[in-house]
């Protein structure tokens, strides 16, 4: 786009208005608009034009502009075609991107970006129509040095700077969110990690009592699974267990992967009985399903340790240690079973 506008600024008007230079300028400006829109669409990972389609569309407009330039009748309306094309490209981008933008960046920021773009597109279309009905005075050629074209050029520069700043802000916002997610999510299973558990229930001071139930989960004979089936199958097993936990998530329930084959579930505002019910439900779901990996069946089981208490009457570290101790007993007593913590406060 900048190259097309640079042609207008550098070439003498009588050369710029010739059919071929004018068509080349139109082609480059349309390509610039399409590539700018394409980058915005790519940012949201939406279906996009290929390079081939962008240049085919640009060449089509350039070709139409060239044919119009060869006719004395249609030559004055080349700029109307260019403006209408740019306006339609902008409207198309808003139609595709407005909803995804609101979903990721809710609030006024999206409206502050898209409302000026919509007004800009409307301005382009109305100026093009004014040229058709009112002539040169309503929309002079870009080569004409008058106040209208100078103000329009200033508007282009201010708009470009504004959109670039908004793009930088959005990229920064997304990167910050992604870094936060990466630091608090397990990349293999998608569950929250140990850091998230620590930050949520240990580092944050709790002023009001909160009844919680902690469930520790450990996949039985996981080393044997890795040795027999391979580590890539072991990763699939971890993902399967994580999916089973995630499918049971509610507003009061969070699942975590602590590391290796160890997982934890934390239930807020819940009793020990509720925790035991959830643990038994998950234990049966894992034990009753036979996984198949390239024709090789795998029976999967897990052991559970459950502890319950009220924060801050009992600290979260003690509750986690109690659940870990109960898990150890479940492993020691034969696996594929549930044990409760021995702490009196936990069993209350």
Image (tube, rainbow, N blue to C red):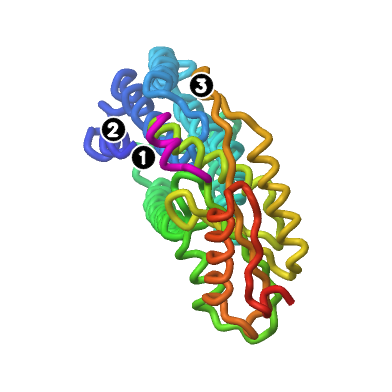
Is residue 61 or residue 165 the one in the foreground?
A: 165
* Residue 144: mark in rendering: 1
Indicate which disc, 1 or 3, sits on the residue closer to the N terminus: 1
- Helix, strand or loop at mark 3: strand
- Helix, strand or loop at mark 2: helix
Dot in front, 1 or 3: 3
Is residue 126 or residue 339 the one in the foreground?
A: 339
**What percent of the width, then of the height, locates residue 145?**
34, 44
Please say whether residue 224 is one of the residues in the magenta stretch: yes
**What percent of the width, then of the height, locates residue 340?**
66, 64
Q: Which residue is mark 2?
A: 13
The local crowd at label 2, few if under 14, some if 14 to 19, many if 20 or more residues have their Cα within 10 Å, is some
Indicate which disc, 2 or 1, sits on the residue closer to the N terminus: 2
Magenta stretch, main secondary structure class: helix
Q: Which residue is mark 3?
A: 296
Is residue 306 or residue 90 the one in the foreground?
A: 306
Do the residues under discs 2 and 1 have CB atoms within 8 angstroms? Answer: yes
**What percent of the width, then of the height, locates residue 183?**
42, 59
| Magenta-colored span | 220-229
**What percent of the width, then of the height, locates residue 2?**
30, 39
- Res 84 seen here: yes
């Amino acid at each position: 786009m900048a190259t097309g506008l640079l042609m207008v600024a550098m070439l003498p008007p009588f050369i710029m208005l010739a059919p071929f230079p004018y068509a080349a300028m139109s082609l480059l400006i349309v390509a610039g608009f399409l590539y700018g829109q394409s980058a915005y669409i790519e940012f949201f990972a939406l279906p996009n034009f290929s390079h081939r389609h962008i240049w085919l569309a640009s060449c089509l407009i350039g070709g139409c502009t060239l044919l119009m330039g060869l006719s004395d009748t249609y030559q004055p309306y080349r700029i109307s075609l260019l403006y209408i094309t740019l306006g339609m490209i902008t409207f198309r981008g808003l139609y595709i991107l407005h909803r995804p933008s609101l979903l990721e960046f809710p609030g006024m920021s999206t409206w502050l970006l898209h409302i000026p773009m919509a007004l800009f597109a409307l301005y382009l279309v109305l100026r093009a129509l004014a040229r058709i009905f009112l002539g040169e005075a309503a929309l002079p050629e870009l080569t004409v040095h008058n106040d209208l074209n100078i103000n329009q050029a200033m508007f282009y520069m201010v708009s470009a700077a504004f959109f670039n700043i908004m793009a930088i802000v959005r990229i920064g916002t997304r990167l910050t969110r992604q870094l936060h997610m990466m630091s608090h999510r397990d990349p293999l299973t998608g569950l929250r990690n140990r850091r998230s558990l620590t930050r949520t229930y240990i580092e944050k001071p709790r002023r009001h009592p909160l009844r919680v139930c902690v469930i520790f989960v450990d996949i039985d004979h996981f080393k044997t699974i890795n040795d027999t089936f391979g580590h890539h199958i072991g990763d699939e097993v971890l993902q399967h267990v994580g999916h089973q936990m995630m499918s049971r998530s509610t507003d009061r329930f969070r699942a975590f992967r602590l590391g290796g084959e160890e997982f934890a579930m934390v239930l807020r505002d819940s009793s020990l009985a509720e925790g035991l019910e959830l643990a038994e439900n998950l234990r049966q779901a894992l034990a009753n399903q036979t996984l198949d990996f390239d024709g090789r069946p795998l029976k999967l089981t897990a052991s559970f340790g459950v502890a319950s208490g009220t924060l801050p009457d009992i600290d979260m570290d003690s509750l986690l240690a109690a659940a870990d101790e109960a898990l150890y007993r479940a492993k020691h007593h034969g696996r594929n079973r549930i044990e409760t913590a021995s702490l009196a406060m936990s069993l209350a």
